[in-house]
Image (spheres, rainbow, N blue to C red):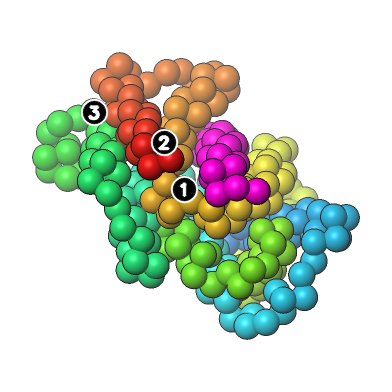
Amino acid sequence: MTPQGAAARGHAAMLAFSALVGGSFSLGAMMARDVDPAAFSAARFLLASVVIGALAAATGKLDRRALAAPWRYLVLGGLFAIYFVLMFEGLKTAPAVSAAAVFTLTPLMAAGFGWLLLRQVTTPRMAAALALGAAGALWVIFRADLAALLRFQIGRGEAIYLAGCIAHAIYTPMVRRLNRGESPVTFTLGMMLAGLAILSVWGWPAIRATDWAGLRPLVWVTLLYTAVFASAATFVLLQYATLHLPSAKVMAYTYLTPSWVILWEIALGHGVPRALVLVGIGATVLALVLLLKDEDARG
């Protein structure tokens, strides 16, 4: 496959990634108070590991090279475990659209970590696009309230989730840094199993205390969706994209997440954000367009 073809598939992977991730915000906000975040994330990693493991076995893509340096998976699994636990902790109080806007700050952070870890250079156009996207995200996070923005009064849920997004931003360049030629499926399985081990140890008291049989159906629907679509599928998509695109461009697709969340919120009957908030959403979409034009310009 040519580099251009691989890059095109990387973009397609991230487009699907943003669509699938969007659903986890709306569903997660509806059930975040029903179950401990660590217990829920452990169950999510368990189900996702089963799906990924079955896929790897069925396709014959289990790579023996993945057994080398298992500490790599602990690093990556730990980063994503932190991200998911803090995501659901934040969704206890942060609205879904606002949390999705926090998620769109990860490209800017990923660009910084991409330079620190991989010396990936951000072009002037990319920097302008990332700044525009961050500005749009902040506008949504502060709910289009200029006074709140000037006072920098961010909600507790958004602040918690922001800490998780920092872990996510580090994860993106770390995949390329630590991958040693393993296939995306194999590498994802190793990360998932390591994350499951970390969450099982860390969250064991919460796992034991959870009344799994008494959870309402929405929790199980969310668990299945996040494990199969927003974990197993998106992890493979993300792993593939990070091997063929710069970290900042990979995470640039998160700019579409608030738009997908709005569609989810409308579909679930939660209404539409006010017009001023949509201005910020428009800025994040424009940022993505600028980044894609930068990619096309370089051929």
Residue that badge 1 annotates: 250
Amino acid beneath label 3: Ala
Q: Residue at x 53, y 53 (%)?
A: 244
Q: Magenta region: which residues?
A: 1-27
Please say if 89 is above or below 253. Answer: below
Q: Name the N-terminal-most of marks 3 and 1.
A: 3
Q: Residue at x 76, y 56 (%)?
A: 52
Q: Residue at x 42, y 18 (%)?
A: 272
Where residue 187 appears, as percent x and y from the top left, is 66, 65
Where does the C terminus fall, quadrant-wise?
top left
Which dot marks residue 296? Answer: 2
Say if mark 2 contacts mark 3, CB within 8 Å: no
Q: Name the N-terminal-most of marks 2 and 3.
A: 3
Please say if 268 is above or below 234. Answer: above
Nearer to us of marks 2 and 3 is 2
Amino acid beneath label 2: Asp
